[in-house]
Amino acid sequence: PTREGLLETPARVARMYGEIAGGMGRSAEEHLSKTFAVASNDLVIERDITFYSLCEHHLLPFYGKAAIGYIPNGRVAGLSKLARTVEVYARRLQLQEQLCAQVADALMEYLAPQGAIVLMEAEHMCMTMRGVQKPGTKTVTLARRGVFETDPALEERFFRMLGR
């Protein structure tokens, strides 16, 4: 390209994809390995965690909010570590269903709580800009692990605390 505005576009796009897909090959272990002892094993929730990711089918963005809940097993992670865990997995070519499951699985593996639950709600540009072209449509995914799989009251409590 010879037009001034396009001269550096290939380099900018390469840097952009490097940033957007910067979670490839990374693990949440770096964020969830440092924990703090707690006496209470009551439900911990972090909500409204904004995330951006790329649909692996169309290479178009999807973005939304995540809510994470877990029942500690004597230890908790720093609150920013939960948001960083979402980032590690969101910054990849991704499916929302897989992203949700990866966050829940990472919590179970590295934090070892009694249970974890992850809710994600996102708008997919592959549905907004192309194909069906339905702006505002949201995809909602849920991943339950540990005690959240066997105790419906805990799941209900999670949703009540989110105001849902």
Image (spheres, grey):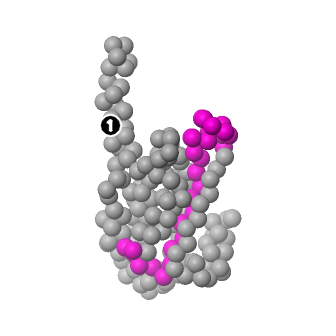
Q: Can residue 105 be seen in this view?
A: yes
Crowding at dot 1, Cα within 10 Å, few <14 / some 14-19 / many 20+, comes out as few
Residue closest to the far bottom:
39
| Residue bounds of the magenta highlight | 109-136
Q: Where is residue 55 in the image (x, y as percent from the top left)?
A: 50, 46
The total of numbered circles placed on residues is: 1
Amino acid, disc 1: Arg
Foreground pick, 24 / 152: 24
Quadrant in which the N terminus is drawn? top left
Quadrant in which the C terminus is drawn? bottom right
The reply to whether the magenta stretch includes residue 57 is no
Name the image quarter holding residue 87: bottom left
Name the residue at 61% across, 72% down.
Answer: 158
Foreground pick, 79 / 14: 14
Q: What element carries label 1?
A: helix
Would residue 82 be found to the left or right of residue 47 on screen? left
